[in-house]
Image: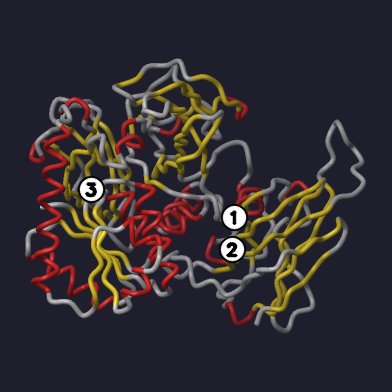
Amino acid sequence: MPRVLLVDDDAEQLEVRRMLFEQAGHETYTAEGAGAALEVFDRAAPQLVVTDLRLPGTEDGLELIRALRRRSSGVKIVVLSGWTSELEQMPEAKLVDAIMGKPTRSRCLLALAAKLSLWIFAMLSSAAVPMAAAELAADLEISSSRMERVEILPGDGPRQYVMAYPGYCKQHVQVFFSVPQPAAGRIALRHSAAVQAHVLRVRQVTPEDPYYLPLANAPILFARADTIESMSDAPVLAYCERLGGSGAPLLQYTIIFTNEDGGTSTRGLMARWGRSTDIEYVYRAYLRPDGSLLRATIQGRGHKEIAFQGRREGGHPLLAPVTLNNMVSGEVASRVRFQLAPQLVDLTAASRELVMDRNWFLYRVAAQELEREGKLRPFGVVDGEKISNPRNYLYLEASIANQGSALAALVRLHGENRLRSSHLGRAGFAIERSGWIRTAVELPPGTAPGQVTSIGFECLVVAPSKNDPLPDSGTCHIEQVSKAFFLGADYRPGESFFRIQNPVDIPAGEIVEFPVR
């Protein structure tokens, strides 16, 4: 049976349909809404998608159809709708394989799925993809009462590790293998009694799968030598972006580390990036149109992009961090290696911290490391580069353009005549880069959205440099502010309660303030 993705913004309808398809023997995935559907599609690579049209609006469904077809010409798409005429008159009707009106009989829907399944299996068997061309990915489920490395022994292949962290829920981790497919029973997980871990599934990813190239080029990352015993600055999640560079398709791989021991201070991380993790791109694979590798680069010392000339296992480069801020090299290795299967993400309309929002356990993991390393202090106390508990911060995301300037966020609370700032009065902590940014402002513990009366932004001239010790002026352009939220008790990002949708220009030296309604 083919893998099936069911999409609907009605949770009850979605659950009924899931049970229907699972009872018919399908491997079934669900998503409430178009955005979630694309995330699941990129991760699970279904061969059949059954989706509602209004998600909640018709345009949301049409955009999902277009996005699915851009990702795969082979996936079969069935649209269920009570307003079939809305789609039949649109050009997107030519992108789908079937349109069915709501309500529809279960047996009719399953019969259509069975008919499409025959076509899918015929397509796969005619492709005759050699086994050597396949990549392998495994889903693990882990829960733990303490921090520990879980050892993975995939048959005759090299051992690898994933990190287990104590917390409130189970961790779902994806890894890949650089060896021929092991039987599921041959994948051994070695860990202490404090950890519960098991393999949910192992799947073969073949070249017709949209996830194949991102997985086939994913880096193998060794632990930084000085972190092996302390288990600090650990790589905990990988993601991949499909970009374009120098006229060639480009896959960019980024690793989220639990912390950064060098480079930017913890206070600076919160002010300039809105998190205490270290998020670093480590590898870029420039591809030819046929998917073969044209050239590859890494982010080396000093944040320099340099050609990768190291070893590979299959298409996977072997990399290791060689600086305290996790720049990498292809010339070293260690005894602990990680093979994190990358999540596919699109960050054209969001900051890279969006990946943390979607994998919110990372906020908790980062806070645990801050506590272990003594980098936390009480609220309102100045103690070197230590910060308050991450749940005491308001997180803001915006799209900005700086012109000889730097931007900082300000927050006013009900009943106060002060504005609290993200940059803490230090010009070097204001944000000079342009594009999508994230920052954080420390507030008293327990502050709720209803206590925030206004959010403002201060535009400063850029920090002095050797080339310009006395900068004169500049302008901060805010294209939009997309969200403002607090972390909950479990470190899950809360609902956003503030947005700016109209562009704003702020001359250097001025502050604008917006009421929070």
> Sequence-wise, which precedes: disc 2 or disc 3?
3
Q: State yes or no: discs 1 and 2 in contact (Cβ < 8 Å).
A: yes
Pointer 3: what residue?
Answer: 140
What distance separates the C-alpha of mark 3 from that of mark 1? Answer: 29 Å
- Observer able to see residue 431: yes
> Sequence-wise, which precedes: disc 3 or disc 1?
3
Pointer 2: what residue?
Answer: 395
Image-based side of 422 in relation to 174, left or right? right
Q: Amino acid at mark 1?
A: Gly
Within 10 Å of disc 3 (Cα), the crowding (few <14, some 14-19, many 20+) is some
What element does badge 2 sit on?
strand
Specify how the rendered protein is coloured.
Answer: secondary structure
Q: Nearer the viewer, residue 39 or 192?
A: 39
At x 64%, y 64%, the residue is 481
Image-based side of 278 in relation to 185, left or right? right
Pointer 1: what residue?
Answer: 274
Q: Nearer the viewer, residue 362 or 512?
A: 512
What distance separates the C-alpha of mark 2 from that of mark 3? Answer: 31 Å
Within 10 Å of disc 1 (Cα), the crowding (few <14, some 14-19, many 20+) is many
Q: Nearer the viewer, residue 409 or 192?
A: 409
Where does the image place residue 161, in percent across and percent down from the top left? 28, 36
Image-based side of 507 in relation to 236, left or right? right
Image-based side of 463 in relation to 414, left or right? right
Q: Of the numbered discs in the image, which one, if any, rests on residue 286? A: none
> Sequence-wise, which precedes: disc 1 or disc 2?
1
Within 10 Å of disc 2 (Cα), the crowding (few <14, some 14-19, many 20+) is many
At x 20%, y 49%, the residue is 197
